[in-house]
Image: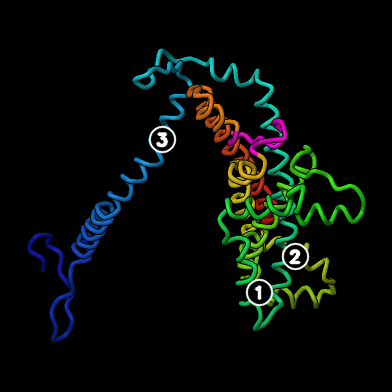
Amino acid sequence: MSAATGVRTPTRPGGPPHADPVARRTGRNRLDRLRARSAWGFAAPALLVVAAVTIFPVVYSIVLSFADVEIGYDGFAIQGFGFDNYAALVQSADWYRALGFTFLYTIVTVFVELVLGMLVALVLERLGATRGWMLALMLVPWSLVTIVNAQLWKYVYDSTYGVATWFFALFGEAPVILGEPVPAITGLMVADIWKTTPFVAIILLAGLVQISEDHYEAAELDGANGWQTFWRVVLPQLAPTLTIAVLFRILQAFGVFDLPFVLTNGGPGTSTQSLAIMGYKVLFQDINIGPGAAIATSTALIVAAGCLLFLRAFRNQAKGGEA
């Protein structure tokens, strides 16, 4: 019998008494709390670094987007806060042009990469021993640093000795690809699609290999053809993976900077100037800190809103499918 609780502790014949369940549970909770404190202690240095190099700059940028900043020889000083930077932003024709180009670039590249990535992933899923070699070959464009990739395409599009110029010259007068708005936008999209489609294909392939063969066999027994199997079996099973791929690509494409910066520097004119390039020019070339921070903050808010709307639509669709 326990002296503290007055409850008889069950015993085993010829053996020691069982431990009190309450004491055992209390000890386990104490151990869990100790492990949690240790985990936070080990993670604290990394969290502090993340806060210093990520969270603080983001918060400081948001603060500067509302600030009236005066530049002087000794640095800059904040004269006050208000909405003047955002008021000037929504009245800027350059901002609307950059926003339109960024939206167009994001929608077209993400859509084409999803379609091509899906086709490539479906082919790779059916490969046997050569799948590894094909994956390694596909990773070559993705592994290239974007600056190197952009410089490579700049040689391809060169108006004098570029391969693309030579190809178009076979059918008539070749356009100056990076010197005209529509060819320049198209050329940027082609370069992005060439680099990023393998990334999307690998993500989708990871989802395809998780689909059980039982689903394909059941569809075959029901008399479904290949197209019906894809739409009614593969695509619903692949929806979470597609969501991840779309979110990754939206975040990357909407913040595009390096590819158009190297290829066109936002030109000709401002036809390929993305929001990121515009923010860079306003902030670092024109030294307008407040408006530059407002461009960066507005871009982040638009991306966040778009991702949240997409996730909400996907969640509602998933709930409707389950119902």
Name the mark nearer the viewer: 2 or 3: 3
> How many numbered discs, if any?
3
Q: Is residue 261 left or right of residue 174?
A: left
Quadrant for residue 9, please give it.
Answer: bottom left
Q: Which residue type does callout 3 highlight?
A: Pro
Query: Which residue is tagged 1?
Result: 134
| Left-right relation of 253 to 296 | right
Work out which residue is located at the far left of the displayed protein and give it.
3
From the image, give the main secondary structure of the stretch colored magenta.
loop
In depth, the one of 139 and 233 nearer the eye is 139
Disc 2: which residue: 119
Identify the secondary structure beneath mark 3: helix
Tell me residue 228's x, y (percent): 82, 66
The residues colored magenta run 265-277
Residue furthest out toward the bottom: 14
Residue at position x 44%, y 24% from top?
64
Amino acid type, residue under disc 2 in the picture? Leu
| Along the viewing direction, whichever of 147 and 305 lies nearer the viewer | 147
Q: Which residue is mark 3?
A: 57
Q: Quick one: label 2 or label 3, which is nearer the N terminus? A: 3
